[in-house]
Image (tube, rainbow, N blue to C red):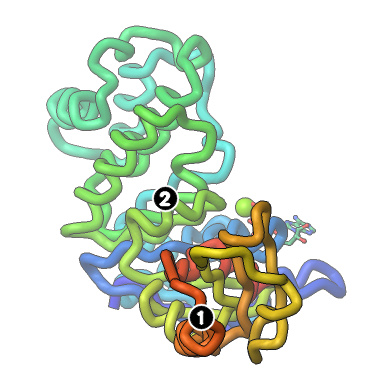
Amino acid sequence: MSILVESLTKMYGEQAAVDQISFKANQGEIVGFLGPNGAGKTTTMKILTCFLPQTDGVAKVCGFDTNTHSMEVRKRIGYLPEHNPLYKDMYVKEYLRFIAGLHRLKDPKNLVDQMIQRTGLTREQHKLIGSLSKGYRQRVGLAQAMLHNPSVLILDEPVSGLDPNQLIEIRQLIKDLGKEKTVIFSSHIMQEVQALCDRVVIINKGKLVANDTIDNLRKKVFVEGTIHVEFDKKVAVQQLKKIGGIIDVQTNNSKQFVLKSQAGLDIRPHLFNFAMDSGYVLLELSEQKPTIEDIFQKLTK
Ligand SMILES: Nc1ncnc2c1ncn2[C@@H]1O[C@H](COP(=O)(O)OP(=O)(O)OP(=O)(O)O)[C@@H](O)[C@H]1O
Ligand SMILES: [Mg+2]
């Protein structure tokens, strides 16, 4: 087990920033760590990376307890902290060599060169970190996290503020990393989560509210359905509202409708029967699957 979190709690005075959460992550898994602002994601990550002690519970990385074996944990973990703090007056290459020195890596020159290439920093390697654009700073942050070839990567919002091209490149990098390592990353970009994660852990106000694959959550978490329907003739809204299970009707022309149905209910057969019984022809009847945003909102509102 690469990451093991058991009944983890962090108190700030009276506030439980992390409240008895438990989850695991295995090698070769990319886990999305989600939750609204202030949910406790960064706090959990700081505990896992030995930057903060917990108040209660257990956090282990590759079998080592973060409290009692912090050096062993640190050797095995790569961490990209939130807001990616870097020494702005160091040059990219100089900074990465410095990090290699901290880890006492053998052949640092070669390792740094390889990492510069891998993170697409070749053209920027001789620049001051302070003069880099946000996306390139993010790459430097990722490079320092990966330099000592850790088996677990903890990335706190690795893709925030990147342009669409950089996003795709960083996404690919994380995807590649996830093949051999354990990656846990937090993000508010649901598209990113959908593209990258095998599984998501969602927390809200410090408490765990979900730990599952996105597909399973779609099946388990009932969110209101959205159905697009089109008839050949005008239909009165009142007529549609009489069909059971419809909670909202929107239309611009009384022929095409966007309907909201009760959570967990498939109203398509009722719409089909309604059209048959009333002599309308159905030109379209389609259901929009709940997105990860819908699921997130349902679980954290
Ligand atoms: N040093 C601290 N002292 C007091 N409260 C803190 C401290 N650090 C964090 N908190 C509180 O703990 C809660 C969780 O914060 P945390 O930074 O873990 O949230 P988050 O899920 O990372 O949010 P975001 O998505 O905004 O980054 C917040 O209410 C925050 O104000
Ligand atoms: Mg945070």
Q: The residue under label 2 is which amino acid type?
A: Glu
Q: The residue under label 1 is which amino acid type?
A: Gly
Q: Which residue is mark 2?
A: 192
| x, y percent for residue 35 | 61, 64
Q: Residue at x 47, y 59 (%)?
A: 49
Q: Is residue 94 above or below residue 231?
A: above
Q: Quadrant of the N terminus?
A: bottom left
Between 155 and 244, which is closer to the camera in this rendering? 244
Between 68 and 118, which is closer to the camera in this rendering? 118
Q: Residues within 10 Å of mark 2 (few under 14, many from 20)?
A: some
Between 225 and 281, which is closer to the camera in this rendering? 281
Q: Which residue is mark 1?
A: 279
Q: CA distance from mark 1 to mark 2?
A: 45 Å
| x, y percent for residue 259 | 61, 70
Which label's residue is closer to the chain start, 1 or 2? 2
Q: Is residue 39 left or right of residue 48?
A: right
